Image (tube, rainbow, N blue to C red):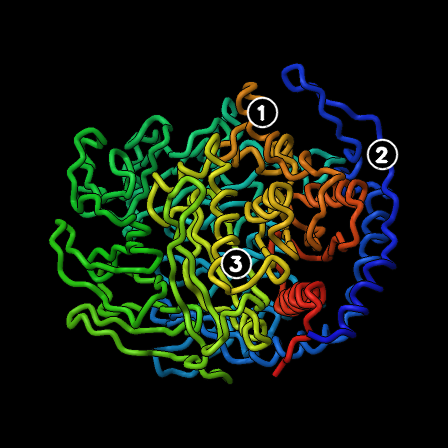
Amino acid sequence: MLAGSLVMMKTLNAQIQYPETKKVNQTDDYFGIKVSDPYRWLEDDKSDSTKQWVKVQNAVTQQYLDAIPYRKNFREAIEKVYNYPKFSAPFKKGGWFYFYKNEGLQNQSVLYRQQGLNGKPELVIDPNKLSLDGTTRLQLFSLSKDGHYAAIGLSKGGSDWQTYYVRDMKTGKDLSDELSWVKFSSAAWKGNGFYYSRYPAPQKGSSDLTAKNENHQVYFHKAGTPQIEDKLVYENKENPQRFITASTSEDEHYLFLNISDRGKGLDGNALYFKNLNQTSDTSFIPIVKEITNNDYHLIDNTKDRFILKTNEGAPNSKVIAVSIAHPDILGAEIIVSEKKEPLLSANTGGGKLFLDYLKDVSTRTYVYNFTGKFLNEIKYPGLGNSGGLGGNKDDKFLFYVYTSFTVPPTIYKYDIATTASTIFRQPEVSFNPADYETKQVFYPSKDGTKIPMFIVSKKGIQLDGNNVTLLYGYGGFNINLEPGFSATLLPFLNAGGIYAQANLRGGGEYGEKWHQAGMLLNKQNVFDDFIAAGEYLIAQKYTSSQKLAIRGGSNGGLLVGAVINQRPDLFKVAIAQVGVMDMLRFHKFTIGWNWIADYGSSEKDVVNFKNLYSFSPLHNIKSNLNYPAVLVTTADHDDRVVPAHSFKYIATLQEKYKGSNPVLIRIDTNSGHGASNTKKNIETIADIYSFIFYNMGVTPQLQ
């Protein structure tokens, strides 16, 4: 730490002049309780007033960040370590192997194909050439069974909306097809056409980035025809907030509909199918007729059975088989019983079942035959995660990717007959993974529950309570935070930082019970787990409250906003990214209603309202608290967690906070729920690291 850094920090913080945000007289009544919402006008992303507010807020934030002397150094250090070739695992179709490659700093990865594993690569699609700023992304590339046609899904500026196109892969020519208003969809091929999900076009005058998305529909599109000729296959107007997605079996005999209704607070799904070879009957047959809190995911089919993964009667999930002739879920046969560890995913390839389990947040993969006989385990190098095993029934080998905090994604080739794994492609990086170490600890939360946490640092770091430490968390939606490599983390570690990743309740690290322990009326457990993680890091001398930063995005942004209201004294810096900050109105925008199953709804009953109101980041900001330095990040094209959450939150924080720490918002353009290209991602992370070190008065020793 340098004295000059502290003086500069205090001077700059004292000079911040926040723009005055106008207030309106808006009050809502929830079960007799009046709740003021003076910044409601910021929900209108199209208004000139909101656009001007964004411009002024960004100017204040950029002036602050520009004054940090080592901001450019952080960006250069991240670029240097990030600049290495990155590959995806290959996938085979129509005699070709397809794969993605990023040369290092390309904004988007490029799709190639080659004949055989040693063939000469040829370009398929370079998304970097589809927009001037490299923010158009290739979200979907799905090949017909024979590889003749490809459905190509593109999104612009980080939006979840996609436009689908079709390419003839034999000629390399794009057809005239253009399918609009596609969202949360795949391309389920049948012959020379595919099933896909879309929404009706937004009403004229409404914002396609904020308007509520309702009436998900499944259509069939034939290659080479206009969208207006697409055939409506399924919709449910009586239940407009249902997600309806389609898939087809490998042999294309069956079409499946997966239907969920989280807007009604249900966490599971219904499952229907249709035999596409029977032209006389066009109706769908239920495998699971009603939507409950049980989930059912189709894995594969044999001649006479459907094989599924489900958590019905098995919180950690099991594998079952259902007769195709008599598809009654009540008569299902158990193929692989539930284990102590949660079953994360189930795939098939080469006539085998590949089941990925999570044991203390590290992947274990077991191989079975289709009758449930255990065959072998695939051994991984250490604490890490792996995925991607899966393919067609006639495949002789498959590919998977293994990674950990300090091991870049490494592609392995798995021989099905010999069960041997060999490295197919290993990244050539400019750092030595042996210079870093990862520990896994288990710390007690407020109620005594043991919570796992990974701690990553350079080897030999001193535990003197004086290390800049970044604690990351999520805790929701049954999502796991597994050990995975990020090159952008290395400059933070090289600068002397420690990274901690806590596996909070609300995720799925220990199955559905772990998820339920952090959702709905149990949501406070998530915040308690995160606070306890900070207390553990301090007690064990990794850091101190003056050197501890926290970061989270989306549901993790909610987490950050909630805990700094509850324990502002514990943290020096807080980074809240694309957070769900208004827990009373989140369901009013785009697909926010889909989160009711995890959060509850302020309109359901007084119990749910009071629970949400008790931790809603926006509604619990208090003027008598000394908040940490806060940097909120969002983007203009985030149509998942709309930026109004962050706008209203920072306006309220700037109004009520009376201390000297900066409370700023960084609003990206042409970006969405995540960075829309590599350049924007590097810039955002460099700003976050700079903000953290600067507000701790520490000058990073960047290499």
**Residue tagged by mark 1?**
610
Farthest top residue? Answer: 32
- Say which label, 3 or 2, has the lower sequence index: 2
Mark 2 or 1, closer to the camera: 1
Q: Residue at x 46, y 31 (%)?
A: 261
> What amino acid is at disc 1?
Lys
Judge left or right: residue 429 versus residue 662.
Answer: left
- Tell whether label 1 touches label 3 (CB within 8 Å): no
User: Which one is nearer the viewer's eye here, 261 or 259?
Assistant: 261
**Residue tagged by mark 2?**
23
- Say which label, 3 or 1, has the lower sequence index: 3
Q: Residue at x 49, y 57 (%)?
A: 539
**Residue tagged by mark 3?**
538
Q: Residue at x 37, y 44 (%)?
A: 449
Q: Is residue 336 visible?
A: yes
SS at mark 3 in the image: helix
Above or below, comparing residue 264 to residue 444 in the picture: above
Numbered-mark total: 3
Instruction: Please state the horizontal and vertical placement of residue 123, each as a whole percent of the image.
Output: 51, 75
User: Which one is nearer the viewer's eye here, 154 or 426?
Assistant: 426
User: Which one is nearer the viewer's eye here, 344 or 452?
Assistant: 452
Alpha carbons under labels 3 and 2: distance apart: 40 Å
Badge 3, how many Cα within 10 Å: few under 14, some, many 20+? many
> What amino acid is at disc 2?
Lys
SS at mark 2 in the image: loop
